[in-house]
Image (cartoon, coloured by chain):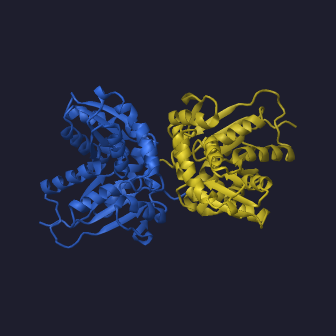
Chain colours: A yellow, B blue
Amino acid sequence: MSDTRPIGVFDSGMGGLTVLRSLRAHLPHENLVYLGDTARLPYGTKSPETVTAYALQATQLLMAYDVKMVVIACNTASSVALVPLARDLAPLPVVGVVEPGARAGIAATTSGRIGVLATESTVAGGAYPRAIAALSPDTDVQQQACALFVALAEEGWGDSSIAEATAARYLAPLFDNEATAPDTLVLGCTHFPVLAPAITKVLDARGARATLVDSAETTAQAVVELLEMQKLKNTDDRTGTERFLATDAPERFARVGELFFGRSITADQVELVDLRPSI
Amino acid sequence: MSDTRPIGVFDSGMGGLTVLRSLRAHLPHENLVYLGDTARLPYGTKSPETVTAYALQATQLLMAYDVKMVVIACNTASSVALVPLARDLAPLPVVGVVEPGARAGIAATTSGRIGVLATESTVAGGAYPRAIAALSPDTDVQQQACALFVALAEEGWGDSSIAEATAARYLAPLFDNEATAPDTLVLGCTHFPVLAPAITKVLDARGARATLVDSAETTAQAVVELLEMQKLKNTDDRTGTERFLATDAPERFARVGELFFGRSITADQVELVDLRPSI
């Protein structure tokens, strides 16, 4: 009953490697194939139509690797394209990052006030407020776009004084009024776990308290449950393999990717793949 | 002898609007068509092959607007694709931003030491050191990648304390050793003029002096000269028009573009164009 087929993980770039990292921690024996659409990143500033078209092309490519499940480790793609992706890939199970993050946020809050930190397009799309409202209509949701967090994470400055100053500026609108401040912050972008130390320092300095919900971690838990439920687990006791695919710049993928994966990646481990029709 | 055809200006996104702004200041009567390839920005993290393919598609589209000249208002595309673009568009004159910036840097330096601030890929491509060495082999060039400047400029935080702290960190390697510090800084990315106040404050705080060379301004001067030389000027005394084209997200183009253009742009002034083969 062992299913050795790999789990496919898709992101616009390297941020989704925080999800791969959590998957690896929970599932040491699963084989993992990660695809980063680095030629067309970031998705966070593109229109829903473009993001959907790109995500459909990318996940179709993962199918060629005989994956048993697809994880959309990209908040933007999860926000705008999960339904068309699930339809396109059916009967393959497809897991996004938004719903697990929303669920974990609801479980964590006691005050009923959740803050969501995300990219501009995830905020504009409103997927987190919708997902939270569907599960818990009385929960109050405040969103804050944190565009600079992506650049800070990719520069390796996630734990710097500049990251703290940036976090202080983004968090101020949420926490300036104590009566309406959230007690839970959902990190609604796969890059943001790298910023968690800076966010925590800002909260401490304000004397504020909030539980940070890392959607990478909660998504990995959702994958574990789904594997059990659908009897898709790999019960081999060999260590699982990782395979990295990128649509551009493997050297940069490896170098920046390490910041998110938390383990060494070398450029020759990254295969260049082409999603675009030839020009 | 008046040539009323528009000048085509191309960038991966909105940063090139600093070039459009300088062109407008110098050439009040010219008609201008600006194309931002917002569906595929940023180019600064992509491979030379991908950037060249994208830039060829984009500039071919400008040809449909009967342009009399093309300005590559993107440092990355100018760095890696100017030769294939000039070949592809011949006999149309093509102006990039790198050569004018290099020339202005050489004119400004008295110590013979120039610093170049640019994106990761422009630095890696080495186009500025090559252009400067070709004109002035004895000039010393130090480069510094300033990835966060792009995000700061797009967030509208170009003149913030966070921008200053970021500039201080990027400038330290260039200015820590007074004996080798440059006396001229070429802003090798069209986003960076927005950061000029922060850079100036950091230099003042260090007691350092350096002339800032804005490649938007120097490129506009190069265009003025070329129009004269090739007798392509529009001698009509009507005010020139601007036409904005974007491959994605016109609303964001208008909102962020204003930061660079320095004048109001409304979303309905921005035409959505498609460069991609249909999917």
Image quadrant where residue B265 sits:
bottom left
- Quadrant for residue B188, please give it: top left
**Residue B65, percent across and down?**
31, 64
Relative to B32, say whether B170 is above or below: above
Residue A154 at least partly seen: yes
Q: Nearer the viewer, residue B3 or B190?
A: B190
If the image is split into quadrants, where does the N terminus of chain B sit?
bottom left
- Report the side of A122 relative to A39 (left or right): right
Q: Residue at horizontal 35%, vertical 37%? A: B206
Residue B58 in the figure: left or right of residue B219: right
A184 over B266 or under it: above or below: above
Residue B110's x, y, as percent?
19, 34
Judge by depth and name the residue closer to the eye, B159 or A226. Answer: B159
At x 30% / y 55%, what residue is drawn? Answer: B19
Image quarter of the C terminus of chain B: bottom right
Q: Position of residue B44 (x, y in %)?
A: 43, 44
Q: Position of residue B132 (x, y in %)?
A: 25, 35
